[in-house]
Image (cartoon, helix red, strand yellow):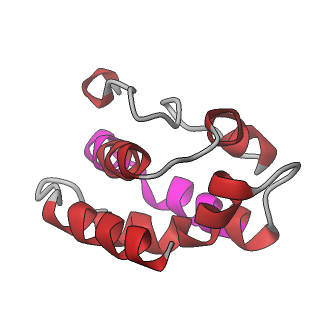
Amino acid sequence: MALKLAAMVFVILLLRDSEAAISCSDVVTDLRPCVSYLVSGSGKPPAACCTGANALASAATTTADKKAACECIKSAAGSLNYNAKLAQDLPSNCGISLPFTVSASVDCSKIG
């Protein structure tokens, strides 16, 4: 698991969006507490996960930020064996809204 997380962080760091104020490392830092929940959890996400998700939602204010966060999440989702239903429900379970679905197949270019 630690090796997968390290690989995910490395891939995400390579995909930084220079136009966005938010970086992939910010996204990874905020969502790191959610990884074990999304891979093997059940029920409601842990408080630390929701705190990170809320921090990310607050930081991603511009369209460029939202697209950058989406691309980072999409890339990470593609490298993890996660529970799609938990990922899809994460924003609402944490009381936030995102302009995209948490998924490896989301089209981040459509975020406005």
Taking 47 as reference, is 78 above or below it? above
Q: Is residue 60 left or right of residue 54?
A: left
Percent x, y for residue 54? 64, 60
Image quadrant where one finds the C terminus: top left
Residue 61: within the magenta?
A: yes
| Residue at the (40%, 49%) spot, across then down | 73
| Residue at the (71%, 41%) spot, across then down | 86
| Along the viewing direction, whichever of 99 and 16 lies nearer the viewer | 16
| Along the viewing direction, whichever of 6 and 19 lies nearer the viewer | 6
| Along the viewing direction, whichever of 62 and 96 lies nearer the viewer | 96
| Residue at the (37%, 42%) spot, across then down | 74
Q: Is residue 32 left or right of residue 95?
A: left
Percent x, y for residue 91? 67, 43
Q: Is residue 44 left or right of residue 88?
A: right
Residue 54: within the magenta?
A: yes
> Which span of residues is magenta-colored?
51-69
**Quadrant of the rendered structure where residue 84 is?**
top right
Taking 84 as reference, is 7 above or below it? below
Q: Is residue 19 left or right of residue 74?
A: left
Report the number of discs. Answer: 0
